[in-house]
Image: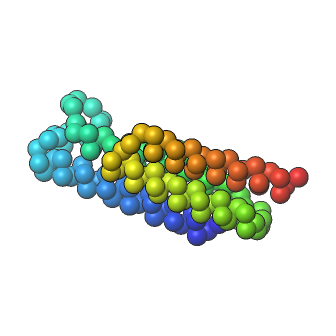
Amino acid sequence: MLYPMSAMVLVTFIVGFIAVKTRFASVKKGTVKARYYKLMEGQEVPEVVTKTTRCFNNQFEIPVLFYVVCTLYISLNITSDFAQVMAWLFVIFRGIHAYVHLTYNHILHRMSVYWLAFICVLVLWANLVIHQL
C-alpha cells in the first residue's frame, strides 16, 4: 500500500506545482493582482486559475479516505492483492481525473473517472472491514 500512496502523493505535488505555476503566471501577465491570492477574492480570475486551484483542492477530499484506509492496511498488517489492485486503480483514476480537469475539462469524462476512483476507495474500505471480521 505504500507505493500507491506514494504515487498519489506525487499526483498531488504535480497538481500543486501546476496550480502555483499558474498563479505566478497570472500575476506576471497582469490578469490577477497578487493581493487576490491573500483571501482568494476581490476580482474575477481567469478560468485556468480557478480550474487549477479546484483541482489541487480536490486532492484533499476523497484521497484523504484513500490515505487513511491504506495506512490502516499497513498498520494492521493486512496483505491483499485485491486491495493492492484497487489502490493502484484509485491512483490511476485520480491521475486521469486531474488530467481531464486540467486540460479539456469535459464534465462527463471527469465525473466518470471521479466515480470510478470513489468506488475503488469504497471497495478498499469494505475489503478492510471484511478482513477484520
Left or right relative to 21: residue 91: right
Tell me the quarter of the image containing the N terminus. Answer: bottom right
- Residue at 45% from the left image edge and 60% from the top image edge: 11
Q: Is residue 3 above or below residue 49?
A: below
Please identify the residue farthest to the top as the structure is shown.
42
At 14% from the left edge and 41% from the top edge, which residue is drawn? 31
Q: Position of residue 79 (x, y in %)?
A: 76, 68
Count up the numbered dots.
0
The answer to whether residue 75 of the structure is visible from this angle is no
At 73% from the left edge and 68% from the top edge, which residue is drawn? Answer: 81
Q: Is residue 39 left or right of 96 when viewed as pictured? A: left
* 8 shown above or below 111: below
Q: Identify the image's colour scheme: rainbow, by chain, secondary structure or one colour.
A: rainbow
Work out whether residue 102 can be spotted.
Answer: yes
Counting from the top left corner in percent of width and height, residue 54 is at 38, 42
The residue depicted at 31 percent of the width and 56 percent of the height is 18
| Residue 38 x/y as whole percent | 27, 39
Residue 108 lies in what quarter of the image? Answer: top left
Where is residue 91 shown, x and y percent of the image?
54, 59
Image quadrant in which you'd find residue 105: top left
Q: Is residue 10 left or right of residue 30?
A: right
